[in-house]
Amino acid sequence: MSSRTRVIVMTISAPVIAFAIVGGFLGKAMAREDTYQHLKIFDDVVSLIMSNYVEDANVDKVMRGAMHGLADGLDPDSAYLTADEVKQVENNTPLAPGDVGIDLTRQYYLRVIATRDDSPAAKAGIRTGDYIRAINDTPTREMSVWEGVRALRGAPGSKVSVTVIRGNAADPHNIDLVRAPIPTNDVTGRIAAPGVGYVRVAAIGSGTAGRLRSQIQELTKNGAAKLIVDVRRTSGGLAEHGIDLARLFVANGTLAMRETRGGAKETIAAASDDGSITLPAVLLVDAGTSGAAELFASALAGNKRAELIGEHTIGRAAIQKLVKLPDGAGLWLSTARYLTPSGTPLHEKGLEPTVAVDEPDVEFGQTPPPGDPVFDKALERLTDKKAA
């Protein structure tokens, strides 16, 4: 190895070594000697690139690709951040107020977890499971969730173009979305059938628990004796706000467990004044039920407070924080994750519904078929219980 190549290798390897030291997040089972072996291979790969590639390699580009690749090997919410992006995190730079209502994960490209009710994306027919192949003609193959969220935001009234894949990758759809203010109506309700109230929780924030309580009280006054709570396509939100919703329904027991590196577990339990809502309930869930809504569903299912009707949830229940690197860049890492009340993994595992009901497949641009089989099954379950 030439002296020039050795300097370049050391320059690239230093942040990687720092990454290994900072967390060892490449896997709990990885022994120290294995880590050093991987770093040796990394050193060899860089050396081969610098000495054999057909032209002089762009060291900065190689470095960014390597760091993005390391973060991609973790979970979809972890990411490598440039120095400029680190400054945004440290300065608490707010997101632009205009949004299209898409929550994202990563699966080769950026992928849609859910679209917010009545958002520009929902009105355009974008659905859970769609792939976003490009944003404003910029491919998302090497774009983190962190970057994708910010690329979609902008001034209200401005446009953003997304290339969407559903089913056939050879048939992408280009859609222009007009950014709009984020909808504020997170809880709605109605009497769905005699004695049955239906509550839609479209998003979860700091005041959602209070609004949910008020909505259920109103439905109770109008004759509701049982509840259907719909958290399909409800994603994002802080974990503690999902726990706040669970406290309305669970009077005692473990609501969730939080695990940090090394296996240390913290139990989050119901308090003495929890459980004010005592009506029998079922929860509607799907692959778009994520984050705070998933913790809410986990707490109710784990305490046998409600059945889950619908599809398997995504398994997105971790907490991220910034870990800075010596060159000013950083890693946005999942440093804690939530478990179910029984202590089983929730993050990257998800929840299995009590009664599985698939949402109907819809071709892009087609109108969904009439009816709602998940809601119908929930109503059937509540009716059967009444008859029993």
Image (spheres, rainbow, N blue to C red):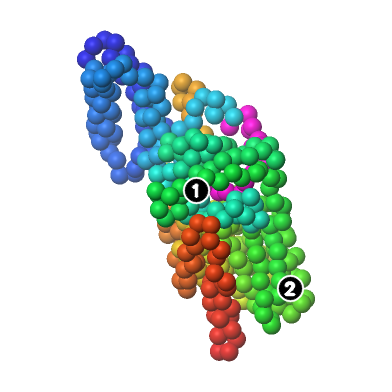
Magenta stretch encompasses residue 231: no
User: Where in the figure is residue 122, as x and y percent of width and height?
Assistant: 60, 54
Q: Is residue 194 left or right of residue 165?
A: right
The one of 72 and 91 positioned closer to us in this rendering: 72
**Cβ–Cβ under 8 Å for marks 1 and 2:** no
Q: Which residue is mark 2?
A: 219
Q: Residues within 10 Å of mark 1 (few under 14, many from 20)?
A: some
The answer to whether any part of residue 350 appears in the image is yes
**CA gap, disc 1 to disc 2?**
42 Å
Count of labels shown? 2
Q: Is residue 72 left or right of residue 267?
A: left
Q: Residue at x 33, y 19 (%)?
A: 57
The three-letter code of the residue at mark 2 reads Leu
Q: Is residue 139 left or right of residue 189?
A: left
For the magenta stretch, what is the residue range? Answer: 89-105
User: Where in the figure is residue 16, as x and y percent of width and height?
Assistant: 37, 27
Q: Residue at x 48, y 52 (%)?
A: 130
**Which of label 1 and label 2 is nearer to you?**
1
Q: Residue at x 73, y 73 (%)?
A: 219
User: Where in the figure is residue 135, as x and y percent of width and height?
Assistant: 52, 39
Mark 2 residue element: helix
Mark 1 residue element: strand
Q: Quadrant of the C terminus?
A: bottom right
Q: Which mark is residue 173?
A: 1
Magenta stretch encompasses residue 92: yes
User: Where in the figure is residue 193, as x and y percent of width and height?
Assistant: 67, 80
The one of 142 and 224 positioned closer to us in this rendering: 142
Q: Residues within 10 Å of mark 2 (few under 14, many from 20)?
A: many
Q: In the displayed structure, would residue 301 be above or below residue 92?
A: below
Q: Quadrant of residue 151?
A: top right
